[in-house]
Image (cartoon, grey):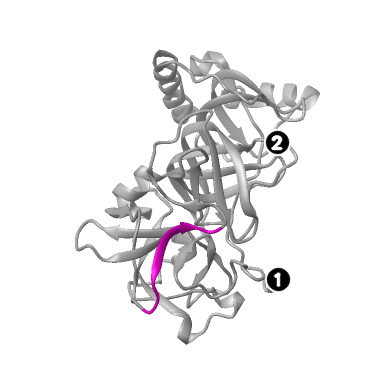
Amino acid sequence: MSTAIITPNENALERSFIGQQRAMIKYFDDPNVSYIDVGYRIKDTENFKLEEELTVRVHVKKKLRGEEFEQFKKLYPERVIDDEHVGFPTDVPVAKYHLDYWNSFNPYLWSRPSSPIRRHDPLCGGISISNKSRWGFGTLGGIVKSRIDGSKMVLSNWHVLSGSERILPGEPIYQPGLMHGGEEADIIANFAKDAMHCNIDAAVAKLNHNRTCSAYQKYIGTVTGVKTPELGMTIIKSGVRSYVTMGRIVGINGTFKNEYYGPNRIIENVFSIKPVYEIDELSAGGDSGSWWLENDTRKAVGLHFAGSDYPEYALAISMTSVLDALQVDVILDD
């Protein structure tokens, strides 16, 4: 992957978005399709090499080749994904995406002086968090402020702070999470609301003022603002499991579907990330809720929620969409 990536012009992007809508109508209900976006072509037969060609990308769980594909084409011609049906160059990446919440019954613990699994005061982005009802942990993304009453809140994923329709406002939130030893004295907030009704996997919990808070992102630095994700942008995050990782935005304007502890849910305003260096890890279970920041400016770009292990991809939701859906703003200094 080259160090510099060409940004498509506005005309090409507009045409790709029209093609993406055609792809959504034709392919999104296919059980083998998990995600549709606009982005760079990926050569999965050449070690997932990236090409600077703008495409409509229909991501599938399994990709057929050779004779197996020819048989499929004869039996299900309407399910074949190609340029003709989309009206724009089309790519078919293969990946199995999963939510990045850690809920194994084997505790994931380690020890180091500044570990994100420890109790933190002030609270900051990149540390362990969970609610009272779920054995596991995700990542506290950062601190925000309500546009309605000015109250301070922690922002993470819905599947980290809630994870069930049975979780009601007021549910206690622990830092560190239960798996990392959180107890009654570690309740730092109470679940307030989520954005799943807007097809956005995000939620906030109102701080109880038991601890101070900061705009700092662990191991990275202070958040300086908010920015819209762009193709080719280099971004960085701090997650509980994988610590600091760096990637590049290779797909935007995506729509994702996945089982959320039951039926499929649709998540919109998604962008996809690929490692800057192929051997690097981007995310792991427990990183859900972390914030992706533009590497050069430390502006918040997206809310991490899912990933794929092989090939290594990450998925995040546009931060501007998250903030508008929840009616909150990022606290830049405190």
The label on residue 110 is: 1
Q: Residue at x 45, y 46 (%)?
A: 266
Q: Which residue is mark 2?
A: 277
Q: Is residue 130 magenta?
A: no
Q: Residue at x 60, y 61 (%)?
A: 240
> Which secondary structure lies at badge 2?
loop
Count of marks placed on residues: 2
> Farthest right residue?
67
Region rendered in magenta: 210-218
Horizontal placement of 4 versus 263: left or right? right
Classed neighbour count for the residue bearing mark 2: other residues with Cα under 10 Å, few (<14), some (14–19), many (≥20): some
Q: Quadrant of residue 4?
A: top right
Q: Amino acid at mark 1?
A: Trp
Task: Give the mark nearest the N terminus, 2 or 1.
Answer: 1
Q: Residue at x 50, y 35 (%)?
A: 28
Residue 324 visible within the image: yes
Position of 317 relative to 41 (above/below): below
Asked whether 92 or 243 is in front, the reply is 243
Quarter the N terminus occupies: top right
Residue 163 visible within the image: no
